[in-house]
Amino acid sequence: QVQLVESGGGLVQAGGSLRLSCAASGNIFSINTMGWYRQAPGKQRDLVATITTRGTTNYADSVKGRFTISRDNAKNTVYLQMNSLKPEDTAVYYCNADIIRTIATAPYDYWGQGTQVTVSP
């Protein structure tokens, strides 16, 4: 069994910062790309940022220059540092990881349970 557990969400004023963490645990052989997505009420789930095993990053235009994704491969953990937060960043943030459970299995997409980020004006 594989689990992704997120932490670090909360309520912050506009202009503030939050740091999200997501740790993968369980039967894991290796992890490919890890990332963060978000879903605001009544909207679809959108990409925020991704990072490959080697550290190549990709960001949504709306967060470039404000958010930074990083990962610790030894800890199977991905982080999202969010600075200069805006009310429009309010959403449930989901961690995602492309995980290979054994040397003989194909990669599979796993999702965390989500963590609420609320930015007040």
Image: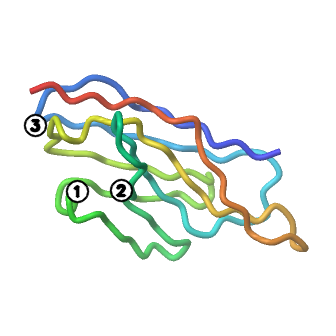
- For disc 3, the neighbor class at 10 Å (few under 14, some 14 to 19, many from 20) is some
Q: x and y percent of residue 92 in the render?
A: 40, 36
Residue 114 left/right relative to 48? right
Quadrant including the N terminus: top right
Front residue of 90/26: it is 90
Amino acid under label 2? Val
Measured Cα–Cα span from mark 1 to mark 2: 7 Å
Q: Earlier in the sequence, mark 1 or mark 3?
A: 3
Q: x and y percent of residue 64 in the render?
A: 21, 63
Residue on which disc 1 sits: 63
Q: Residue furthest front?
A: 42
Residue lying at 60% horizontally and 37% vertically, measured from the top left: 5
Residue lying at 76% horizontally and 46% vertically, measured from the top left: 2
Residue 80 left/right relative to 23? left
Front residue of 40/61: it is 40
SS type, badge 1: helix
Quadrant of the image occupied by residue 20? top left
Contact between marks 1 and 3 (CB within 8 A): the answer is: no
Measured Cα–Cα span from mark 1 to mark 3: 13 Å
Residue 48, relative to residue 117: is it above or below?
below
Residue on which disc 3 sits: 15
Amino acid under label 1? Val
SS type, badge 2: strand
